[in-house]
C-alpha cells in the first residue's frame, strides 16, 4: 500500500494513524492535509510514500500432492483396435481479463487554498448579525474575558462588509494577544464555535485588540517582501517560521503577484511553515 487517507482528533493524530496503517515513518511519506479539523469535526490527511513499494506479485499456487495412479486392469490378450466414432472437437473457452492500468498518484506538498488570495467574502453564512445576535456575542466574549482574569477589559462590536468585528480593550493588550497572537486566535476560535452552536448564520467573527491584526498583517507583508528579495539574491529557498493558516494566507497573497517567486507550505500543524523560492 503506497497511499492512504486517515483521520484523527487533530492533524498529528491523523498522521500517526496513517503511519500506523502504512507501517512506515514520517520521513518516508508526503503529507497532504485535507482538513485541519476543529470543533465537531476530525482532521483528515492523505499520506503517500515518497518511494512507492513495488507491486507484490501473486504467489504461485501450492502444488498439490501427487496422486497415486490407479492400477490398470491387466490385458489378457491383444485385440484389434476398435474404430472410434467421429467426435465433435471440444472448444476450450478461455476468458481474457485485461489488467487494470495503475492510476498515477499525485503528491501535493502544499495546500492550494493557502495560495489563493485572501477572499473578502465571509466564510460563514454571510448574513448581517441582528442586534440580538450582536448582544449575545458581546455577552459571551465579556464572560470569556472575565474567566481569563483580564483586568479592565471592555468589549465592543461592529459590523463590516466581510465580518463581525469584536474589539477587546484592556489595560494590558499583551495578556490578550499572547505569543505571536496565539491567545487572541484561540479566543476568536472559541467565539466562532459559540456562533455555530447558536445556529447564527452570520459573517465570521474577527476578534481584535489594540489594532494587533492590522499591525501583524503589515509586519508579515514587509517580512515576505524582504525574504523574497533575499531568495532572489542568493538563489536559494528561504524558510519562514511556523504560522497559523490565516497568517500563511497573508504571505501567499503578498507574494502571489511576483512572477519571479513561488511560495509553498510544508509540514503539519502547528509547525506548518512557508518556503519562499526563486522560480
Image (cartoon, rainbow, N blue to C red):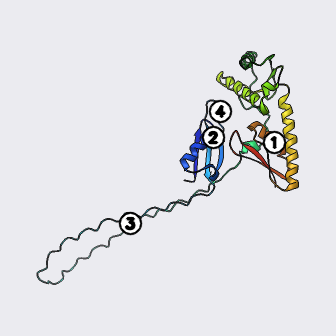
Instruction: Tell me how far mark 1 sits from mark 3, CA to CA.
Output: 65 Å
Mark in front: 4 vs 3: 4
Q: Answer whether labels 3 and 2 touch (C-beta < 8 Å).
A: no
Does any portion of residue 168 appear in the rendered image?
yes
Mark 2 residue crowding within 10 angstroms, few (<14) / some (14–19) / many (20+) = some
Q: Earlier in the sequence, mark 2 or mark 1?
A: 2
Q: Residue at x 88, y 41 (%)?
A: 222
Relative horizontal placement of residue 197, taking residue 276 as reference (left or right): left
Left or right, 19 with respect to 112, comes to left
Tags 1 and 4 touching, CB below 8 Å: no
Mark 4 or 2: the one toward you: 2
- Please name the residue that numbered disc 3 is placed on: 93
Residue 199 rendering spot, x and y as whole percentages = 66, 23
Q: Which residue is mark 2?
A: 12
Identity of the residue furthest to the left in this view: 76
Give the Cα separation between the discs numbered 2 and 1.
24 Å
**CA separation in Å, label 1 and label 4:** 23 Å
The residue indicated by pointer 4 is 38
Amino acid at each position: 500500500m503506497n497511499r492512504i487517507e486517515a483521520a484523527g482528533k487533530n492533524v498529528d493524530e491523523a498522521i500517526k494513524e496513517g503511519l500506523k496503517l502504512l507501517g512506515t515513518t514520517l520521513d518516508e511519506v508526503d503529507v497532504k492535509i485535507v482538513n485541519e479539523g476543529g470543533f465537531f469535526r476530525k482532521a483528515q490527511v492523505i499520506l503517500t510514500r515518497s518511494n512507492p513499494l513495488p507491486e507484490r506479485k501473486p504467489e504461485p499456487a501450492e502444488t498439490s500432492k501427487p496422486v497415486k495412479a490407479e492400477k490398470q486392469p491387466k490385458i489378457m490378450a491383444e485385440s484389434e483396435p476398435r474404430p472410434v466414432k467421429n467426435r465433435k472437437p471440444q472448444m476450450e473457452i478461455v476468458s481474457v481479463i485485461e489488467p487494470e492500468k495503475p492510476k498515477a498518484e499525485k503528491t501535493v506538498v502544499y495546500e492550494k487554498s493557502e495560495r489563493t488570495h485572501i477572499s473578502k467574502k465571509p466564510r460563514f453564512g454571510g448574513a448581517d448579525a441582528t442586534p440580538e445576535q450582536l448582544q449575545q456575542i458581546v455577552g459571551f466574549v465579556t464572560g470569556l474575558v472575565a474567566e481569563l482574569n483580564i483586568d479592565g477589559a471592555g468589549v465592543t462590536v461592529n459590523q463590516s462588509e466581510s465580518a463581525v468585528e469584536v474589539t477587546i480593550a484592556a489595560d494590558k493588550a499583551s495578556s490578550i494577544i499572547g505569543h505571536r497572537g496565539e491567545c487572541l486566535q484561540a479566543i476568536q476560535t472559541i467565539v466562532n464555535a459559540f456562533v455555530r452552536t447558536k445556529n447564527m448564520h452570520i459573517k465570521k467573527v474577527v476578534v481584535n485588540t489594540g489594532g494587533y491584526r492590522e499591525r501583524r498583517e503589515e509586519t508579515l507583508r514587509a517580512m515576505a517582501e524582504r525574504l523574497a528579495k533575499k531568495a532572489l539574491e542568493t538563489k536559494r529557498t528561504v524558510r519562514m517560521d511556523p504560522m497559523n493558516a490565516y497568517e500563511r494566507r497573508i504571505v501567499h497573497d503578498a507574494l502571489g503577484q511576483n512572477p519571479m517567486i513561488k511560495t509553498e507550505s510544508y509540514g503539519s500543524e502547528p509547525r506548518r511553515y512557508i518556503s519562499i523560492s526563486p522560480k
